[in-house]
Amino acid sequence: YWDRIKGTKIAKKSLGMALFCFDFSVNAGTRRGAKTLQRACGASPDGIIGKKTLAVALRQDPDYIIRRMHEIRQAFYESLESKFKVFGKGWTRRNKEVLETAQSLG
């Protein structure tokens, strides 16, 4: 998961941003984790973190990207309507905890 999302390269700019992308990738797959980062930073959401995505993401404020990833992740969970009724409380708690941890790491 870490290698697929280019975690080491992202972490050089922001460990928190790398953590958030990594955690969602483990939870929902690396393509969804990558697309979330891409949407948060305004890159083309193809699900593959390459040179273009890294260039766009690493130019931006990490706290902004982390907050946007949190919003996008929460919207994804809530879109899973029937499953959200069952698992939503836990998903929301995890999303909030990862946001707080990621923000504390910078």
Image: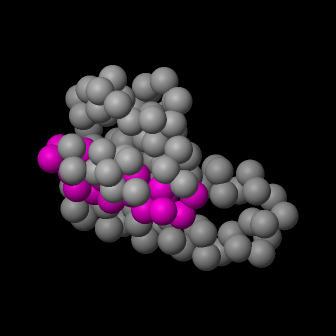
In x, y percent, where is residue 16?
28, 56
Left or right: residue 18 versus residue 30 is left
Q: Main secondary structure of the magenta part?
A: helix
Quadrant for residue 58, please give it: top left
- Name the residue at 77% across, 75% down: 86
Q: Residue at x 22, y 62 (%)?
A: 105
Residue 69 appears at what percent x and percent y? 46, 47
Q: Residue at image x 53%, y 44%?
A: 31
Q: Quadrant of residue 56?
A: top left
User: Residue 13 in magenta?
Assistant: yes
**Colour pattern:** one colour
Could you tell me which residue is drawn at 75 percent across and 66 percent down?
84
Q: Nearer the viewer, residue 90 or 4?
A: 4
Q: How many marks?
A: 0
Left or right side of 27 for 12: left
Foreground pick, 55 / 93: 55
Residue sticking out furthest to the right: 82
Image quadrant containing the C terminus: bottom left
Q: Which residues are magenta?
A: 10-28
The quadrant in which the N terminus is found is: bottom left
- Give the x, y percent position of residue 42: 44, 26
Q: Is residue 86 above or below residue 34?
A: below
In magenta segment, residue 14 = yes
Horizontal and vertical percent for residue 49? 39, 36
Is 20 positioned to the left or the right of 89 in the image?
Answer: left
Residue 5 versus residue 53 in the image, above or below: below
Residue 56 visible in rendering: no
